[in-house]
Amino acid sequence: MNAKNPLSSEPSASASRPDSVANRLIAVIDIGTGAIRMEIAEIKEDRSVNTLEKLSQAVTLGEDTFQMRNIQKTTMEECVRILKSYRRRLDEYQITRDNQIRVVATSAVREADNRLVFTDRIFIATGFEIAPLDEAEVNRITYQGIRPYLTAKPNLDEARTIVTEIGGGTTELLLVQHGDVLFSNNYRLGALRLREMLKGYRVPLSKERTIMENQIERVVEQIVHEVPSDKSMKLVVLGGDVRFALSQLRPEDEIPDPTNSPDELDRIKVSELSKFTDKILQKNEDQLVQNYHLSFTDAETLGPALLAYTKLAEAYQLKHIYVTKANFRDGLLKEMADQKNWSDEFNRQVIRSTIDFGKRFDFDETHARHVAFLADTLFQSLQNEHKLELRNRLLLYTGALLHEIGIYVNQRGYHKHSMYLISNGNLFGLGQTDLLLVSLIARYHRRASPKATHPGYATLDRLSRIAITKMAAILRVADALDYSYSQRVKEIECEINQGQLIISIPHVEDVSLEQIALVEKGPLFEEVFGLKVHLRNK
């Protein structure tokens, strides 16, 4: 395995997945702020996704959460009614198994104080298990959906490209260049959130725009501060609001046929979008519904969303923005097609983000990369022993990279400082649950073994606790193998014989230093796997 190409020793992450069934049917359901949307698709043998049907029904989840912090009983029952109808539709497709269906919720459910009551009610009534996604998970899924569009246009792939969607409750933003996610963040700026704020102010239509602009410009200033402009900057936007604007500004015969170029991006002048936004903001919701045949929910969010897109483009002094047909559910379907395993490309993005995070704390990058390489080699060699899921390989690698960043705070008890920094950090694509697991892997690379009384560890379910203990035990052995911080153990070979894990180390004449280190770090491995670790030179 090459340390410079982490997680690349296998041909691809998909190589170790079970064979997929040809043309497998799947469905994703997105419970959003203003609508519950479902897409039904088939996965072909090459894991490409062919969408068969799209459904959408309006709900008032965002209004409830952003005004009252609670989802009202009437709204819950409306969601139950919609999801029951979706369940019947899925039965017609014979999509009935849990591994064929993924149901997610975003900010409206995530921020509700009674979100557990809501998710339990849905499960009891429909059998759907809702997974409220945190912001990092939303960013990961958005990236999965947008990536094919960027790679299809070299001028976007090479530029510093902002990818953003003004949702109902939040704005997701990624900065991408050459396929790398250079920055990701979420902002509490949403079209429905803005509209609900205006209702609280009870201002006339003539004053609404000024209030919205003030709120939007504050967030845009923060974005520009975090993502400074340069000459190559491009802006790609997602979302039905801007696609609707494009449909009004461009006759149908000018819009490329999506069947000919599925990854095509449309372009719209910022000046045109600005004029259309002015026109929309001069009308109230009833007028928009009547004039454009919109649903009331879409009419509520249209003006605030278009204003936010316009202000962002103007802040970067852009003349055009690119509009994509991609949506959040495209990313969900792609993850389903990959059988919920993380792709090699996603692994690479997480590792790159992790290295950047470690540099913020002046970590010893050479040692960190080498320990991660050794831990990954052990993980692969011991698959029959640990039997962990493929995604744990990335979590272990990430924890190994960051196991010593706590030294930045204090040498004493630095493993606990590492845990704190990681669990409160921001690594692209890793949600709070995954961050907790990575932080615990780093925390247990030395000193005390995991205990039920330890913060964080005590909150995990049994399978997660076992996985953490196994990965921490592997990391301790890997760390012992670079005890000299010299990276002299460049490759290892593992075999299990008579209750021992025998690690052969070629081209190293004296392994006594590493064996001494294992006296301290080896007991957890022996306790977990029942194998005493023995080193020998070769």
Image (spheres, rainbow, N blue to C red):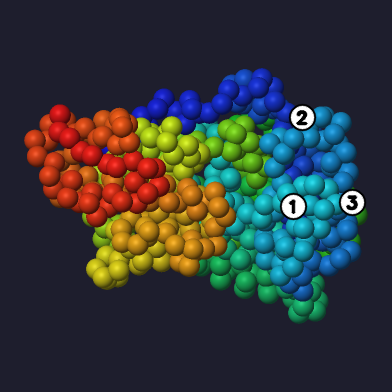
Determine the residue located farthest toward the left in the rendered image. Answer: 509
Which residue bears the numbered disc 2?
52
Which residue bears the numbered disc 3?
81
N-terminal-most mark, 3 or 2:
2
| Residue positioned 48% across, 67% down in the render | 453
Q: Nearer the viewer, residue 442 or 504?
A: 504
In this rendering, does residue 205 appear at all?
Answer: yes
Q: Which mark is residue 31?
A: 1
Determine the residue located farthest toward the front in the rendered image. Answer: 498
Q: Residues within 10 Å of mark 1 (few under 14, many from 20)?
A: many
| Residue positioned 28% across, 49% down in the render | 522
Specify the quadrant of the image occupied by residue 412.
bottom left
Query: What is the C-alpha distance between the residues marked 3 and 1?
Result: 13 Å
Q: Is residue 239 left or right of residue 92?
A: left
| Kind of residue indicated by mark 2 | Leu
Q: Nearer the viewer, residue 251 or 480?
A: 480
